[in-house]
Image: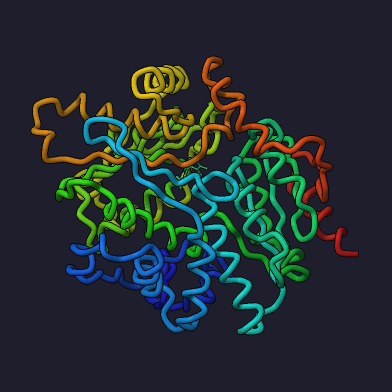
Amino acid sequence: MFFYSLKNQKSRISFQEAVLTSLATDGTLFFPEKIPLLNYNFIENIYQHDIYTIAMQVIKQFVGKDISYNALYEMIIKTFHFDIPLKMIHDNIYVLELFHGPTLAFKDIGARFMSECLNYFYKVKKCGFLTVLVATSGDTGGAVAKGFDQIDGTEVIILYPYKGISKLQQQQINTLGNNIFSVEIQGNFDDCQNIVKKAFLDRDIKKIYNLTSANSINIARWIPQIVYYFLAYKQIININKNIIISIPSGNFGNMFSGMIAEKMGLPIKYFIASTNINDTIPRFLQSGKYHPFLSKQTISNAMDISNPSNFARIWHLYKKDINKLKNKLIAYPFTDKDTLSIINLVWKKYQYILDPHGAIGYLGLKEYLQKNKNTKHTSESYIFLETAHPVKFVDKMPVILQKNIMYLKQKFFKKNIQKKNTISLPKDFNIFKNWLITRTN
Ligand SMILES: *Cc1c(COP(=O)(O)O)cnc(C)c1O
């Protein structure tokens, strides 16, 4: 399939080029030239198909001929090598657990698929060595580090905010070594993202490096994520046509993937964008004004993003028509206080432990049910995404629950592992640039 840039719909670029470059030369994101519709019978009979067949059906539409069928199938097996269960918590409210991958976050799926693509382009298509530059608010860094660890033809440089990420996240980013490097930036996530954006445009850097990004601006991140919306559908007990999905959202990559799944034929009635107090999108749907504030730190730190990069794709998908968008998308923001109290409540009532991000997803459904008390809910199914395992955020969890997940901590936290390939820098682009240019000498 071909992709065009959001600025120039006449442009055409292959899947491979789009993955290798991340961003169009005009600085905007790539968008698929068409959205393929899956066969109606395939979706109706989805429970007959295994995870790999479903993933293949979805992903091959976007890849086209750039990767051979067999190679793509191998990549899919390596990407979807863990469970993605859908569990009912109560009353037709389901959780889709996306955290069973190696770094305990849904981003494992996109990061692994992307690294497999780059590896294939390097080995089979003989593309040059690539440096993957990535800014992280926490989970991307870990997933990308793990997904690219010792992948031939690539090195990864991860920028993360020095106060913004949890200990386990730091460990995942800073201890692998080999082709994985990290830079702690003395600033917040937006500072990291700004440095990365500037690096992509910098001529001196381009002379030395072949750069690509592993953030969800890269199409190889969100394409495999479309798959798990179909997997969720497959696992609903009483399939009905009114599915409402709440997605804890930061950069809105997950949301965009879900919206593509719906356009491909999945019957989803509404999406709920559940955010923390970084609430640009809920405010936008209310007022029609897109006005990001500075991002604020919360306990759901992977969503501390005020200017979500994938929103440009969503806006394009809905033809820049706010009413069309509002027919599909609802958005609610929640505070840390709301988050902690719902974690407690869900544990007490249902013995299910939410992480702070999933908790916000659950809150979105609750809010929807509250606001739509008079509709007949028996014909609706509700799903929220649990985007990370609670142990990742153990230091942010209510104290009583910390005890319940402590035992897991030992499994995931390793003691006294040395930091490798890591450095701390101020939030100044020129200092970063200087470091980047001189490190190759
Ligand atoms: C990245 C992340 C999110 C936000 O996902 P987007 O696709 O950026 O909206 C939510 N929860 C967790 C745990 C994450 O790591």
**Name of the residue lying farthest toward the right:** 441
Quarter that holds the C terminus: bottom right
- Say above or below: 206 vs 320: below
The residue shown at (9%, 27%) is 374
Question: On the image, which quarter does residue 316 sit in?
Answer: bottom left
The residue shown at (67%, 57%) is 133
- Say above or below: 222 vs 99: below
Pick whichever, 14 or 64, lies toward us. Answer: 64
The percent position of residue 77, horizontal first and vertical second, equals 49, 67
The total of numbered circles placed on residues is: 0
Report the side of 251 relative to 95 (left or right). Answer: right
The residue shown at (65%, 78%) is 122
Report the side of 214 relative to 175 (left or right). Answer: left
- Say above or below: 371 vs 62: above
Quarter that holds the N terminus: bottom left
Pick whichever, 139 or 404, lies toward us. Answer: 404
Report the side of 205 relative to 66 (left or right). Answer: right
The percent position of residue 411, horizontal first and vertical second, equals 65, 37
- Say above or below: 410 vs 176: above
